[in-house]
């Protein structure tokens, strides 16, 4: 039975995001977290969803399954050690770093998954830098230690140099990458040996071994691990909870998600170290107490998650109070009330009605048509939380419906993709929806937009790249002068924001120097998109 106290319920919550580059094992680790949380069970030698439903995976979109990468974020909730775990899965490619940024706005911490052989890959460095920009408490899981990989000290050095965060190992591997014997817990000195299970379908067998026995059984591998730990201790890379919570250091765990080695220790680390939900500051930087009346923050909108539903979900994180399904809340941006009769909890692609939720929990509102990313919801006591800034786009393509007879579906589709943030849709006052410009952080966003328009809305699209490479926010007074210049275009987003597009940073600098009276503002999150 719930405690019926928002502060006590929040203390039981751990709401965190999981990020990685493609193929680092993020989806596998996510499924193994669910296995250890009892949300999955083994069936015919593989991990299956609750009951006898399809294989559980956070990658539900058809294109994700074809490409083998995460494209959109999903929400998974499961119990573990008398706690409620809210796991927010994120896209696995830098082209979708804006979606990662939105998800992190709803998380209290993040788990960074690294491939033991690849470390931090340059093309996805920005995903991790997003965490650093937000001073997000970051735990690190060095995955695939059961396969050949790099030296562990070298990996720690790379994390420190590229992310400017101090890695502080909590567990340390015995045996080089590819010859994984077990891990030493630096806090207790315990050595845990792991035993493989068939297909990784059940929890890995764990045996705690004394130091003397470990030295006898593991020989040189044990001594090498001790020597490395002595070096780590000498340079002061020790766990510091305060530095972790401030985003200065990152506790590091070694393991193998495929074989379940080290997964339990990693999940224990989330429960033991990740912060529970705390009061969220409003736009005036005044924290909203956890036990204040209900409030929530919308961080994601997603349509067509399941062809059987064909609906639209607005995901919000509960920030304060007790959410009860059916309660009437106020949509802060419009000031309008609406009932929350159709509130659901989402488990990957699956969903079920949810009756109540507490700070840190994520709720999906079905077909709440007016709700947008960054909106605030509240009951009884008004509050406005800061919105989520859009990233500065770097790629621009003109979109046209391939079949003019499907223009209505095309227009409906681009409006939905714009609301979800799949791409930014920019319109010219003369052409409107006839030939909108899709603006993106990375080119793969165009692929997703085209795929969804054709497969979900029945509106195949032709995309024509433009020569524009950079955008600045402008205003109505500056628009005529900018439109008169060569190599410059001014388009509008659905929210009325005007963006001036330039073909090069050189030309932008020239215009800024020659016309200081014109408004040309950087977008807030520009530095994190490039």
Image (cartoon, helix red, strand yellow):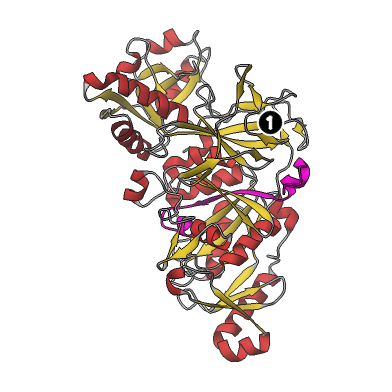
Using the image as rendered, state which of residue 520 and residue 82 is in the foreground: 82
Using the image as rendered, state which of residue 291 and residue 209 is in the foreground: 291
Counting from the top left corner in percent of width and height, residue 309 is at 41, 35
Image quadrant in which you'd find residue 198 = bottom left
Question: Is residue 17 inside the magenta stretch?
Answer: yes
Counting from the top left corner in percent of width and height, residue 527 is at 53, 36
User: Looking at the image, is 370 positioned above or below residue 268?
Assistant: above
- Whether residue 255 is visible, yes or no, is yes
| Residue drawn where x is 43% and y is 56% of the image | 52
| Residue drawn where x is 49% and y is 58% of the image | 31
Using the image as rendered, state which of residue 130 and residue 13 is in the foreground: 13
- Whether residue 503 is visible, yes or no, is no
Indicate left or right for 5 with 263 as reference: right
User: Looking at the image, is 41 positioned above or below residue 333?
Assistant: below
Indicate left or right for 225 with 464 as reference: right
User: Where does the magenta region start and end?
Assistant: 1-28
Q: Mark 1 points at which residue?
A: 295
Counting from the top left corner in percent of width and height, residue 375 is at 59, 26
Indicate left or right for 358 with 525 as reference: right
Image quadrant in which you'd find residue 48 = bottom left
Using the image as rendered, state which of residue 117 and residue 461 is in the foreground: 461
Crowding at dot 1, Cα within 10 Å, few <14 / some 14-19 / many 20+, comes out as many
| Residue drawn where x is 72% and y is 33% of the image | 281
């Amino acid at each position: 039975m719930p405690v019926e106290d928002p502060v006590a319920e929040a203390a039981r919550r751990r709401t965190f995001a999981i990020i990685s580059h493609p193929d680092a094992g993020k989806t596998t680790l996510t499924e193994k977290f669910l296995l250890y949380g009892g949300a999955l069970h083994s069936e015919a030698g593989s991990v299956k969803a609750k009951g006898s439903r399809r294989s559980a995976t956070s990658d539900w979109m058809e294109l994700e399954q074809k490409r083998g990468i995460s494209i959109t974020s999903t929400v998974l909730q499961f119990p573990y050690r008398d706690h409620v775990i809210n796991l927010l899965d994120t896209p696995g490619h830098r082209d979708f770093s804006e979606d990662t940024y939105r998800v992190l706005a709803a998380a209290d911490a993040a788990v960074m998954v690294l491939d033991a052989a690849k470390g931090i890959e340059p093309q996805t460095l920005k995903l991790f830098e997003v965490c650093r920009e937000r001073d997000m408490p970051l735990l690190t899981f060095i995955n695939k230690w059961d396969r050949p990989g790099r030296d562990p000290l070298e990996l720690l050095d790379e994390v420190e140099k590229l992310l400017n965060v101090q890695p502080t190992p909590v567990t340390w591997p015995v045996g080089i990458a590819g010859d994984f014997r077990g891990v030493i817990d630096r806090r207790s000195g315990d050595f845990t040996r792991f035993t493989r299970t068939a297909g990784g379908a059940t929890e890995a067998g764990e045996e705690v071994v004394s130091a003397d026995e470990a030295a006898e059984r593991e020989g040189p591998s044990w001594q090498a691990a001790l020597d490395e730990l002595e070096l780590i201790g000498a340079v002061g890379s020790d766990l510091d909870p305060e530095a972790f919570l401030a985003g200065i250091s990152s506790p590091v765990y070694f393991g193998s998600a495929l074989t379940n080695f080290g997964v339990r220790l990693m999940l224990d680390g989330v429960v033991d170290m990740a912060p529970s939900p705390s009061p969220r500051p409003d736009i005036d930087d005044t924290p909203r107490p956890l036990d204040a009346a209900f409030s929530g923050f919308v961080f994601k909108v997603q349509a067509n998650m399941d062809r059987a539903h064909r609906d639209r979900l607005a995901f919000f994180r509960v920030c304060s109070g007790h959410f009860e399904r059916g309660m009437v809340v106020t949509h802060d941006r419009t000031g309008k009330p609406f009932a929350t009769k159709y509130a659901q909890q989402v488990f990957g692609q699956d969903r079920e009605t949810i009756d109540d939720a507490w700070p840190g929990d994520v709720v999906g509102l079905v077909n709440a048509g007016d709700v947008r990313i960054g909106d605030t919801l509240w009951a009884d006591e008004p509050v406005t939380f800061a919105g989520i800034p859009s990233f500065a786009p770097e790629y621009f393509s003109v979109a046209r419906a391939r079949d003019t007879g499907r223009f209505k579906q095309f227009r409906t589709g681009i409006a939905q993709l714009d609301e979800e943030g799949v791409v930014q849709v920019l319109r010219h006052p003369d052409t409107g929806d006839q030939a909108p410009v899709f603006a993106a952080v990375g080119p793969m966003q165009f692929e997703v937009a085209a795929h969804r328009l054709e497969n979900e809305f029945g509106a195949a699209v032709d995309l024509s790249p433009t020569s524009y490479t950079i955008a600045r926010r402008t205003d109505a007074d500056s628009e005529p002068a900018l439109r008169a210049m060569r190599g410059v275009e001014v388009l509008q987003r659905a929210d009325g924001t005007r963006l001036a597009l330039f073909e090069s940073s050189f030309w932008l600098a020239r215009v800024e120097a020659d016309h200081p009276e014109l408004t040309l503002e950087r977008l807030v999150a520009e530095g994190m998109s490039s």
